Image (cartoon, grey):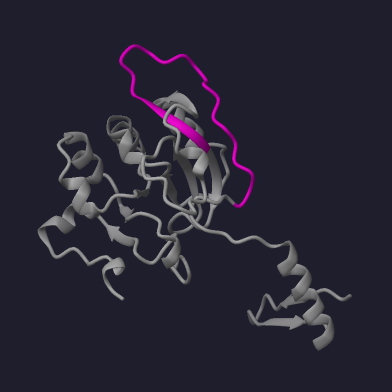
Amino acid sequence: MRALTFILDPTMGSLTVEGPGQDEAAALLSDLLSTSRSLNCARPLEPPFEPDTGEGQGEGEAVLRVARLYHGSVVDGPGRRSVVQLQGCHRHCPGCYVPETHDPAAGRAISVHRLVAMLLGPAGKPRDGITVTGGEPFLQPTGLLALLRALKERGEHTVVYTGATLEELVARPESAVREALSLVDLLIDGPYLRRLGRDAGEWRGSRNQRLLANPLSLLTRSVPPSPARTK
C-alpha cells in the first residue's frame, strides 16, 4: 500500500499531496482508525511520568500532592503545554478519563519549587504555558496558590481546570482560592458530564465547561452562562 506523500515548495509555499487510489485510501484510513485513540484534556500525547520526590523539602515549604506530569500536550489549553495533574477529587464524575487521580491519599507529595523545576524542564521542549489539572486542583488551594505565584514570576501562561464553577469557587471562604484565581490566565470550569462529551470543542471534556479568561476580572462583569443550562 502506498503512503501519502507531501511535497512542499519552499519558494512558493505551495503544498502538493500525492496519495493512493480510492480503495487504497479507504484501507489506509481503516488501518489508522483501528490503531487510533481519542484525545481529550488530561490525556497525554506521550506516556506521562510520575514525579520523583527530588530534594527534601524545607520547613514550611509549600507542597502539592501530584499524580503525574507530562510535556507537549495540545489538548490541555492553547498551544503546546507542560501539564501537572494534581491528586485528589471528590466529584468522581462518571466516565472520568483519569479516575486514578481521585484518591487524595495516592500520588506523591512534592515541594512547589521542585515541581516548578520539573514543569519548566527539560530545556528545548516547546512550551506555550503550564496547565494545572487533576483531580481537583482547588482541593489544595494553598499549594496551588504557591505554584501559580512561582509560575507567574517566571512569566508563564497559566491554565487551570476545575470541576467547580467560578461562582462556586468565589463563594468559598479560603482566601487562597480567590488569590489563586487572580493568577489564572484561563480557567476551564465545570464538572465533566459524559452526556455532553460529544463535540465539546477545544480543550474541554464536555460542552457544559466554560473557557474563562482572567476569571477573577469576570466577577465585575457578566459571566457567560454555562452551556449545561441550555438544551
Q: How many marks?
A: 0
Q: Quadrant of residue 146?
A: top left
Q: Position of residue 108 (x, y in %)?
A: 49, 26
Q: In this view, does 51 lie above or below 159?
A: above
Name the image quarter holding the C terminus.
bottom left
Image location of residue 59, percent across then percent down: 34, 11
Residue 218 position, x and y percent, is: 17, 58
Residue in the foreground of this view, choosing between 90 and 127: 90
Q: Is residue 145 left or right of residue 125?
A: left
Numbered range of the magenta stretch: 45-68
Q: Residue furthest left?
A: 220
Verify whether residue 189 appears in magenta: no
Taking the image as drawn, is residue 19 in sight?
Answer: no
Q: In this view, does 48 lie above or below 189?
A: above
- Residue at the image position 41 percent from the left and 35 percent from the top: 88
Residue at x 31% of width, y 39% of height: 138
